[in-house]
Image (tube, rainbow, N blue to C red):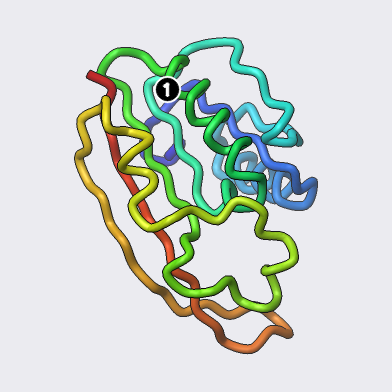
Amino acid sequence: MAKNGFLNIDAFDISEAGINKLKRLAKSYGLAINAWIQDLQEFKFRKKYDLIMTHGTLHFVTKDEWKRFLSKAKENTNQNGIHIIQIFTNKIPASSEIAPFVNGIADEGELEKVYKDWEILQSKSYIFDDEHLGVPKHQHSANKIVARKI
């Protein structure tokens, strides 16, 4: 996003390695990104945003926690601001390598209910192939929503 002209970007992740990689890449491209290590469950909004994105993270906290986070995110989004949210769903079982860590998998269509008071620009349900080093090829089911605060 920073490479495409977005400014004032805040990014956090619980993974130190992930944040360090982001900082290295940002520096190599000469981009300014405010990035830090943070547990989603402890994050406190301190300002309002025009865009909030989360991809591949919410299902790792309990359903109550991700719903609380999205509620706070909605409150801390400027008028006409956008959310792009992706979460694994229960359309197919979680793959064996992540199943012990998936605490808040969403029901199919649950994001649409969370954003029923916003304009839904896109809602997508899909299954995708995935593979990681040392892990056999597997699939995940997910929902993605793009919604605008009206």
- Name which quarter of the figure residue 135 lies in: bottom right
Q: Residue furthest bottom?
A: 136
Left of 110 or right of it: where is 99? right
96 lies above or below 124: below
Along the line of sight, the residue nearer the viewer: 90 or 81: 90
Query: How many dots with numbers?
Result: 1
* Quadrant location, the N terminus: top left
Q: Position of residue 38 (x, y in %)?
A: 74, 33
Along the line of sight, the residue nearer the viewer: 21 or 76: 76
Instruction: Report the residue at 66% width, 59% height from top.
Output: 102
Q: Which residue is mark 1?
A: 74
Q: Amino acid at mark 1?
A: Lys
* Quadrant location, the C terminus: top left
Under tag 1, what secondary structure?
Answer: helix
Q: Residue furthest right?
A: 16
Instruction: Report the residue at 58% width, 80% height from top.
Output: 131
Q: Position of residue 69 (x, y in %)?
A: 56, 30
- Name which quarter of the figure residue 126 lies in: bottom left
Along the line of sight, the residue nearer the viewer: 114 or 76: 114
Instruction: Report the residue at 60% width, 51% height from top.
Output: 104
Left of 74 or right of it: where is 44? right
Q: Position of residue 51 (x, y in %)?
A: 39, 28
Left of 39 or right of it: where is 139? left
Query: Is disc 1 surrounded by few (<14), some (14 to 19) or many (20+) residues within 10 Å?
Result: many
147 lies above or below 94: above
Along the line of sight, the residue nearer the viewer: 99 or 135: 99
Q: Position of residue 139 (x, y in %)?
A: 50, 79
Left of 132 or right of it: where is 5? left
Instruction: Report the residue at 60% width, 34% height from top.
Output: 11
